[in-house]
């Protein structure tokens, strides 16, 4: 259940849906009008992010309507007194009528035109100063690798932008990136690395997950004045802070520890006790009323840093009525298998992570048992675990993360958090969220155990599975973002350091929920 309406910018549509919306928009207003609106919006953003009247702007214009948008942007900039040079990468006779008209307007304003080969081969051209690069090579329709000369041009622009600290504005999508999946259109495809992307009609999933975040920079959405009625119901959204408000129930004064649920952590085989302890600490920091930790290895008498956590021998703690987090440091022994069967059969709510996922991937009986559950369940695989669960390889998962998450949710009748850049949260009914927080500081051991513990604590506090998963993913990533912003990481940030920040983030969400009512 999603508690709050999403903004237009947070709604994510597929390329197929965008095409359908565009067709309706063209019936409402001409293609030339849409192109003019797009070009003007791109020009206005270019001015905001660094275009200078003293140093020329370089525009890359491709062979399709994306090139037409680029010409229109060049025209708008030139008529405002900006110096613009354009690399024309399409043949005029192959442009649409509207793109040809945009090109002619650009020529009439005195744009300088440079041959692609001249920029690639002429050192005087590459040594020129540029205040901004606008990428209008390819849009959302690109399905094949950019050809050799254009591929070399993309690589040249990427290098120049880094060497000279030039901002790069991509029109609609960075050229070479698949707007649905967030991956290059082919494994060896060159992709523009933009600092900013202005995307038209609606936001796209691929700009926010997988490799997409490495190429898009800051994303701005422009609806092109297409009426709201032309947009179909949306099933995919960005997992933003504002959409989480009211997902946490404010705590009553008349509360006690039993009001906020019991979390039982199951894991911690020999040599991996730390994983279970991290998950338990995360549950404690995330508001669980009571936290228990049962380990396959001999458990410590208590956690000296957090003596609030209660340790139990396996089998001593009832799983009935508890939220169970199973997997951190679990291993794949026969004892681990038996423990997983018991958890699936008896836990009131369940979070499955790490080795518990590997056991499920290898056993069809466990898969059937899991699918038959009708109580809350969250699975938190990373791409390799997801590949094992779907009997695929990691490349298959990463090549279409939204599709993989949806397949997992349906196959196991559970909410999925597919971890990674732009984590995907997916419900069995197909509703999907792309997380907006997090950074490479999370690429270290133990952070997944922390995420599982946070999700378990939220389930114990009566969040439904989808809310628990999306809040957990958001606060987990936000904690890392806050730490990095203060100079802790991304290199060397440890999972334990996330815990106080996660607590702070959850409390801030709860406070905002109260004050927004």
Image (cartoon, helix red, strand yellow):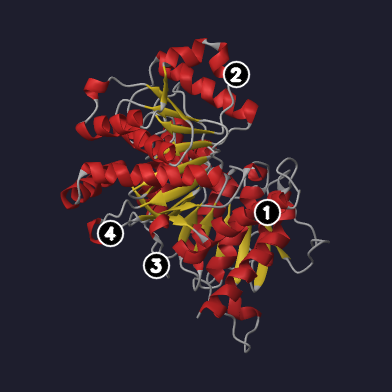
Residue at numbered disc 4:
233
Task: Give me the residue at 73% from left, 43% from top.
Answer: 271
Tag 2–tag 3 contact (CB < 8 Å): no
Callout 2 crowding tier (Cα within 10 Å): few <14, some 14–19, many ≥20:
few
Residue 374, quarter of the rendered image: bottom left
Residue at numbered disc 1:
276
Task: Give me the residue at 63% from left, 59% from top.
Answer: 265
Task: Give me the residue at 22% from left, 42% from top.
Answer: 31
Q: Secondary structure at mark 4?
A: loop
N-terminal of the two: label 2 or label 1? 2
N-terminal of the two: label 4 or label 1? 4
Quadrant where the N terminus lies?
bottom left
Mark 1 or 3: the one toward you? 3
Residue at numbered disc 3:
5
Tag 4–tag 3 contact (CB < 8 Å): no
- What is the CA distance from the residue labelled 2 to the residue labelled 1? 56 Å
Mark 2 or 3: the one toward you? 2
Q: Secondary structure at mark 2?
A: loop
The residue lying toward the viewer, choosing from 29 and 193, is 29
Image coordinates of residue 262 in percent, x first then y, are 61, 71
Q: Secondary structure at mark 3?
A: loop
N-terminal of the two: label 1 or label 3? 3
N-terminal of the two: label 4 or label 2? 2
N-terminal of the two: label 2 or label 3? 3
């Amino acid at each position: 259940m999603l508690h709050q309406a999403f903004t237009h910018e947070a709604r994510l549509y597929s390329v197929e849906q965008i095409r359908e919306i565009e067709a309706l928009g063209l019936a409402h207003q001409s293609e030339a009008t849409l192109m003019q609106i797009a070009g003007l919006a791109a020009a206005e953003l270019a001015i905001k992010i660094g275009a200078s009247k003293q140093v020329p702007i370089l525009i890359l214009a491709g062979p399709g309507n994306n090139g037409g948008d680029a010409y229109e942007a060049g025209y708008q900039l030139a008529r405002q007194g900006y110096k613009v040079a354009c690399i024309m990468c399409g043949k005029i006779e192959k442009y649409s009528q509207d793109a040809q008209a945009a090109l002619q307007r650009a020529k009439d304003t005195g744009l300088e035109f440079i041959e692609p080969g001249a920029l690639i081969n002429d050192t005087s051209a590459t040594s020129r100063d540029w205040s901004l690069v606008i990428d209008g090579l390819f849009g959302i329709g690109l399905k094949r690798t950019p050809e050799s000369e254009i591929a070399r041009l993309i690589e040249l622009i990427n290098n120049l932008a880094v060497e000279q600290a030039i901002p790069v504005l991509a029109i609609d999508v960075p050229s070479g990136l698949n707007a649905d999946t967030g991956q290059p259109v082919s494994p060896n495809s060159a992709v523009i690395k933009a600092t900013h992307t202005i995307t038209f009609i609606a936001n796209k999933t691929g700009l926010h997950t997988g490799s997409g975040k490495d190429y898009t920079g800051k994303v701005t959405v422009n609806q092109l004045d297409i009426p709201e009625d032309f947009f179909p119901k949306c099933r995919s959204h960005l997992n933003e802070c504002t959409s989480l408000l009211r997902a946490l129930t404010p705590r009553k004064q008349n509360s006690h520890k039993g009001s906020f649920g019991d979390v039982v952590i199951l894991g911690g085989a020999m040599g991996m006790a730390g994983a279970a302890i991290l998950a338990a600490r995360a549950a404690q920091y995330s508001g669980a009323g009571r936290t228990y930790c049962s380990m396959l290895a001999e458990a410590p008498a208590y956690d000296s840093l957090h003596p609030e956590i209660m340790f139990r021998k396996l089998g001593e703690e009832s799983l009935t009525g508890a939220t169970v987090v199973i997997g951190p440091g679990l291993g794949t022994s026969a004892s681990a298998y038996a423990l997983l069967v018991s958890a699936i059969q008896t836990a009131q709510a369940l979070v499955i992570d790490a080795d518990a996922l590997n056991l499920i991937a290898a056993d069809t009986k466990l898969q059937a048992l899991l699918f038959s559950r009708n109580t809350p369940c969250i699975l938190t695989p990373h791409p390799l675990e997801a590949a094992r669960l779907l009997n695929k390889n990691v490349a298959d998962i990463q090549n279409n993360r939204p599709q993989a998450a949806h397949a997992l949710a349906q196959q196991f009748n559970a909410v999925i958090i597919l971890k990674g850049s732009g984590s995907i949260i997916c419900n069995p009914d197909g509703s999907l969220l792309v997380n907006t927080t997090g950074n490479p500081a999370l690429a270290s051991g133990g952070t997944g155990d922390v995420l599982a513990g946070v999700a378990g604590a939220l389930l114990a506090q009566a969040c439904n599975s989808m809310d628990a998963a999306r809040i957990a993913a958001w606060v987990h990533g936000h904690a890392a973002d806050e730490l990095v912003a203060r100079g802790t990481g991304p290199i060397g940030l440890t999972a334990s350091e996330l815990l106080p920040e996660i607590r702070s983030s959850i409390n801030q969400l709860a406070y905002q929920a109260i004050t927004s009512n």
